Image (cartoon, rainbow, N blue to C red):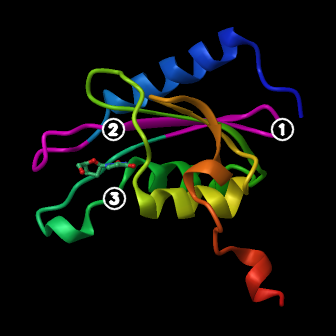
Amino acid sequence: MTPPAEADWERLRKAAREAMSRAYAPYSGYPVGVAALVDDGRTVTGCNVENASYGLSLCAECGLVSQLQNTGGGRLTHFVCVDGNGRSLVPCGRCRQLLYEFGGPDLLLETPAGILPLSRMLPQAFGPDHLAQ
Ligand code: THU
């Protein structure tokens, strides 16, 4: 699939920032927003939702994959994560695994080090293929 034009990354960034503005992060004070393009052209987003029982807090990516599945499924192709200042942020390790399930190794991520495939952010990933072996 052809990567989107620069303007599309900007559009994804904007969607991630909008999602970040809706984060519920009263405990960490660290709002996060994410946005991704789906292979059918949809855009899905998410924000972190924390909990008084800290360990139950949901990362923004949890909301994103839930929205993906609940709006028709599909494959993630391009992904952006931003912090409370709207700057590019790397997804945490657990969330890389969540993204791998629905994007695989070729999912492109915008990171502070540039655009990278998920295979670079989560090398030798465990995934659905292993269960089929
Ligand atoms: N957080 C995310 O939402 N996604 C990430 O990939 C990194 C961390 C959230 C979890 C928590 O609510 C806050 O950032 C501080 O760790």
Q: Judging from the image, what secondary structure is the residue with disc 3 in? A: loop
Q: Viewed as shown, does residue 132 lie left or right of 114?
A: right
Earlier along the polypeptide chain: callout 2 or callout 1? Answer: 2
Give the numbered dot on residue 40.
1
* CA gap, disc 2 and disc 1: 25 Å
Question: Could you tell me residue 35's position as x and y percent?
Answer: 54, 34
Amino acid, disc 1:
Asp
27 is within the stretch colored magenta: yes
* CA gap, disc 1 and disc 3: 26 Å
Earlier along the polypeptide chain: callout 1 or callout 3? Answer: 1
Q: Quadrant of residue 24?
A: top left
Give the numbered dot on residue 32.
2
Range of the magenta residues? Answer: 24-45
Give the numbered dot on residue 58.
3
Q: Quadrant of residue 124?
A: bottom right
Question: Could you tell me residue 73's position as x and y percent?
Answer: 74, 55
Give the numbered dot on residue 115.
none
- Residue drawn at x 75%, y 52% as measured from the top left: 72
Compared with residue 123, is residue 126 higher up or lower down, i.e. above or below?
below
- Residue drawn at x 12%, y 45% as measured from the top left: 26
Dot 3 beta carbon under 8 Å from ligand 1: yes
- Residue drawn at x 66%, y 57% as measured from the top left: 69
Looking at the image, the residue that sits furthest to the bottom is: 133
Q: Viewed as shown, does residue 40 lie left or right of 33?
A: right
Amino acid, disc 3:
Leu
